[in-house]
Image: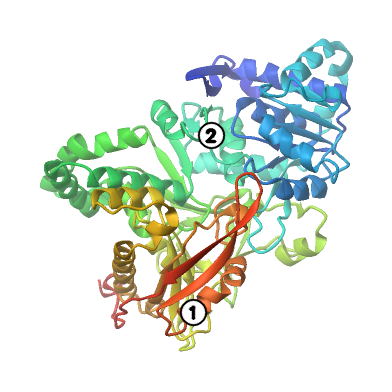
Amino acid sequence: MRNAATMGGRPAFREKEFGIWQSWTWAETAEEVRNIARGLMVLGLNPGDHVAIIGRNRPALYWSMIAIQMCGAVPVPLYQDAVAEEMAYVLEHSGARFVIAADQEQVDKVLEVQSRVPGIEQILYHDKRGLRKYDHSAMTSLEDLAAKGLAAQQRVDAELTARMAALTPDSKCVMLYTSGTTGTPKGVVLSNRNVIETAKAGAAFEGLTPDEDVLAYLPLAWAGDYIFSIAQAHVVGFCVNCPESAQTMMTDLREIGPTYFFATPRVYEGQLTSVMIRMEDAGRFKKWLFKTFMDHARKVGGKILDGGEVSLGDRLKYRLGDLLVYGPLKNTLGYSRIRVGYTAGEAIGPEIFDFYRSLGINLKQLYGQTEATVLVAGHPNGQVRPDTVGVACPGVELKIDDKGEVFYRSPGTFVEYYKNPEATASTKDAEGWVATGDAGYFVEGLGHLRIIDRVKDVGKLASGQMFAPKYVENKLKFYPGILEAVVFGNGRDHCTAFLNIDLTAVGNWAERNNISYTSYQELAGHPKVLEMMQSHVEEVNASLADDPMLAGCQIKRFLVLHKELDADDGELTRTRKVRRNIIATKYADLIEALYSDAPSVSTRTEVSYEDGRKGFISATLALRDAKVFPATPSRREAA
C-alpha cells in the first residue's frame, strides 16, 4: 500500500510470456492483490488459515502470497518439482484448506493426493490450459477469483480493512519448509517482524534502491527467494522479473541484466561449465586470448574490484581484457549490470568464486538459514574472501561453542517449528540462540566466519585428522566435467569418493575426442573419462596437501557412478543438497568395495522414472586408485 501510494507508477513486477515482457506498476499490483484477497474472503478464508502455493515464479503467485497475508492467513509455498508423495506430507502437516496451483501439472499432483489430505477444500489455479474438462465444483481460476473479489468489494472491504488493522509485527507472516536433508521437512514459522527487520537490514547493508532489478527464478519454497523477491522487493520497492520458463532462464537473464542477483553454487558452476565448453570449441587464437587475459584477471581482478593497489600497467592490461574478454563474457552471462551478487545455499568452491570476481563481478558469499530468515553472515564490500562467509549481518550476533558449532541470535530468528515444540526447543534456547548445525571458526585477526561443514558430517579419520567432506566436494565440482561428488572417510584409514559426470560437459568433450557412446552409463564408464576424472582427483589431492588441517582428506580411491544422483530417488533434496545418510545406505556395497582391493564392483540400483514408475539399472563400475601427496605447509600460511 505504501509503494502504491509513493511510487505507484514505477514497475513492480515483470513477466515474460510468449516471448513478450509484460509489466505491472506498484499501483496495478496493489489492485491485483486486493482483488485476490477479496476473492479469498468470499471463499471463506479465515485468519490463521494456511494456504499452499505451488508453481514456478509468476507475479500472480507472488500477489497471492501477499493477498493471503492481507486476509490474516499464512502462505505455505511448496517446491514445484516435488513429487505427489512429498507434496502430500506438507499439505497434511500444514493443514492447508486451500491450494493455489500454477498449472495443470500441479493441479494433477494435488488431485492425486487429495483423498489422503482431506482438509483441502478448494484448488485455485493460474494457468487454465488443459483444465477445461476438469470437475470445477471445488476448483476456481485465480482470474475468476479476482473477478468475484472485485464484484464483492462493497460487501467485504470493511472486514478486509479490519483484518489488516489486526495484524501486528508478531503476526505469522509465512511458513517455509526446510529441505529435509536428515528426515522429514520442518515447517519454519516466520513473523512479520522477522521478515521486515531482516529485509531492511539486508537492504541497508548493500545500499539497495528502488532502481534495482532482480530475476525471480529460484523455488518459491526457498527462503532465499522469499527474502529477495518478496520481502526486500516490497521494503525497498524494486522490480521483480519472472522468466518465461526454466528453459529460457539464461536468455531472460541476459535480457533483464539484473543489478542484484542471487544464485546457488550450482547455477554458477553450470555457467562456468558452459563457458569452458564453449572455449574448448573455440579456435586457437580465441583460446590463447581467453587464457592470457583470464590468467591476468585472476592475478589482479579481485584487487581492482576491492580497490586494492594495482600497478598502472596491470590496470591498463585489465582494461584491455575487459574490452576483449571480460565485458563480452559478462554480457553473454547476463551479468553486465550486476552491482551485488550473492551465492548461498551451500559452500561454493574457492576457484569458482575467484573466477567470477576476477571478471569484476561483485560476488559475495552469503551464509544463512531458513530459521534466520536467511541472513546470518555476509561479506562487506572490500572484505571479500573466498574461504570465509564474512562477518555477522546487521543486528546478528554470532558465537561458537566448545564443540565448534556456530550459533546466532538475530531479529530474524524464527518463531517456531510448526507442530514440533521438541525440535524448536532443541534448536533455539531460552535466550534466543539458534544452533545452526554447522561447524566453523572465526579467522584470527579478521573476525570473519569460516564454515567447515555440517557438524554431523565433520568427523575424524582413523589417524585423528579432520574429515570435512563438503570442502573436498566443492573443490572437485570446480571441474566442468564433475557435476556432483560425495566423499567418505569418517572413522576410516583414508577417503574415497563417488563422482557424477556432467553429461553436457563430458559429452561435448567426448564428441571433440571422437569418443562414441549411447548412454550416460556408457560414457561414465569409458576408460578415457575415468582417466580424466582421475587427473581431476589428483589435482585436488595436490591442493589439499598444502592445507595441513585437511591434508588427510585426500582421496585414495574413487568411482564414477552409473547414474546421476536425483531428488526423485531421494539422494538429493529439492534444493540439490546431498542426503548423505540415504546415499551411504543405498550404495553401501559400493562404499565397501572402495575400501577393498577389488578392481571393480557390480551393482543393481533402483531408479524413479519421470512418470512415477520404478525400475532397476545394473552396472559394473571400475574402482580407481588416485595418487596422494605428503602434507606440506600451506602457501597462504607461509605468506
Q: Is residue 88 left or right of residue 572?
A: right
The quarter of the image holding the C terminus is bottom left
The quarter of the image holding the N terminus is top right
Question: Based on the displayed image, in which of its 4 quarters is residue 235 positioned?
Answer: top right
Question: Based on the displayed image, in which of its 4 quarters is residue 635 positioned?
Answer: bottom left
Kindly identify the residue that appears in the image at 73 percent across and 65 percent down. Answer: 429
Residue under numbered circle 2: 216
Q: Is residue 75 visible?
A: no
Amino acid at pointer 1: Ala
Numbered disc 1: secondary structure: helix
Kindly identify the residue that appears in the image at 71 percent across and 50 percent down. Answer: 86
Q: Is residue 389 visible?
A: yes
Amino acid at pointer 2: Ala
Depth order, front residue of 400/502: 502
Q: Is residue 193 left or right of residue 297?
A: right
Residue under numbered circle 1: 593
Up-down relation of residue 119 to residue 46 (above or below) = below
Labels 1, 2: front one = 1
Up-down relation of residue 79 to residue 617 (above or below) = above
Circles 1 and 2: CB distance less than 8 Å? no
Numbered disc 2: secondary structure: loop
CA gap between label 1 and label 2 equals 44 Å
Mark positioned earlier in the residue sequence (1 or 2): 2
Up-down relation of residue 634 to residue 309 (above or below) = below
Kindly identify the residue that appears in the image at 65 percent across and 30 percent down. Answer: 62
Crowd tier of the residue under label 1, counting other residues whose Cα lies within 10 Å: few below 14, some 14–19, many 20 or above: some
Residue 47 x, y percent position in the rendering? 86, 34
Residue 151 x, y percent position in the rendering? 82, 10
Crowd tier of the residue under label 2, counting other residues whose Cα lies within 10 Å: few below 14, some 14–19, many 20 or above: many
